Image: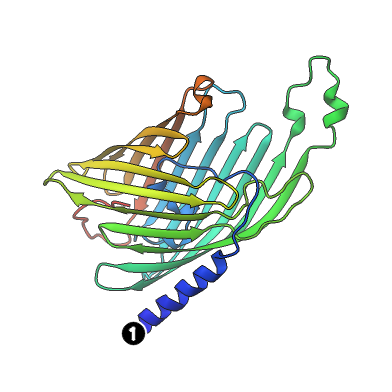
Amino acid sequence: MKIVHKIRKAALALLIISGPLFSIGQQDPMYTQYIFNLQTINPAYVGSWQTMGFLALSRQQWVGFSGHPTTQTFSFQTPLSTQNVGIGFDVVSDKAGPIRRIMVNLDYSYRIMLNTNTSLRFGLKGGFSNYNNDINSLEPYPDGTPDQVISGLVEDEFMPNFGFGVFLSSPRYYLSLSLPRLLQESKGNFSTMSDIRQLYFAGGIVFNISDNIKFKPTFMTKAVVGSPFQYDISANFLLAEKFWIGGMYRSGDAFGAIAQWIINSRFRIGYAADFTFTDMKNYQHGVHEVMLSYEIAFTKRRYVSPRYF
């Protein structure tokens, strides 16, 4: 009963805090391989691997388009000795044209075991974003007159922020709810660009199709007041516990393919490609995303099956 009471109090606090959402500006970087990269949006995910883990991801969006967005992500997570506490950090470098944002965050989670296989984690995220708006990097007008016009518009701003999340999981399913950034403020020529309040809800489940094939549907929704509601859905198949392959659809934006090779219980390599069906399709060559992850187990236990999320 004490656990149920704690969960009810935490859920009530979550609803109260997320009630006054509002936002303006550019949205967060999106990831096609979001299911293996939830830490960037939900601090409650840290520790869920039950191993010390490193993840690196590079996303090249709208390749072939001048000044196309690029996102580089590095994250680390580990449970502490009790396994009930997880800690970690993530660093994201996001660049689009002359604007570059670097986010650095520390993540903390606390786990409550609901039964033998199901856990509920509560997480906190805190850190900062550094924005650089280098207008001088743009090409000048043909008559060569803009030097005076754009001089003085080069800015470098520091903005702190924090967020929270909850993560319910078992070996076969998960549900994730998070608000990774709560603060909004305006400085100079910036209006917190991507530090806007965005509420994420995601989930997935694994089904056995046969001894060598598993099916994993997943979804992610993103809500931003003043912007269209967006969702991602994907369908992935795990072949012989070694290779994930599947497809995805993002509302109003793109469809794509996802693949991941589980080399062993420690090392994974993933690749995804998106192809937009918007007007941008005639001016670029798709979106390409590469992911690497490596895990270090604290014990010598053997894993019966790989981690699914």
Residue indicated by mark 1:
1
Residue 116 lies in what quarter of the image? bottom left
Give the answer, above or below, for where 152 lies relative to 112.
above
Q: Where is residue 198 in the image (x, y as percent from the top left)?
A: 55, 54
Residue drawn at 26 percent across, 73 percent down: 115
List the single residue furthest toward the left.
211
Quadrant hosting residue 274? top left
Q: Quadrant of residue 138?
A: top right
Considering every residue shown, the one lying at the far top of the view is 143
Nearer-the-camera pick, 141 or 106: 141
Q: Position of residue 225 (x, y in %)?
A: 58, 53
Callout 1 secondary element? loop
Residue at the (36%, 59%) spot, across then down: 175
Q: Residue pushed farthest right?
A: 148
Count of marks overlaid on the render? 1
Quadrant for the N terminus in the image: bottom left
Relative to 119, 104 lies left or right? right
Q: Is residue 58 above or below residue 55?
A: above
What's under tag 1, amino acid-wise? Met
Q: Decide: is 33 above or below 171.
A: above
Left or right: 13 as drawn, with respect to 150:
left
User: In screen coordinates, is 176 left or right of 304?
Assistant: right
Left-right relation of 123 to 137: left
Label 1 neighbour load within 10 Å: few <14, some 14-19, many 20+: few
Image coordinates of residue 162 in percent, x first then y, are: 59, 61
Q: Position of residue 223 (x, y in %)?
A: 51, 52
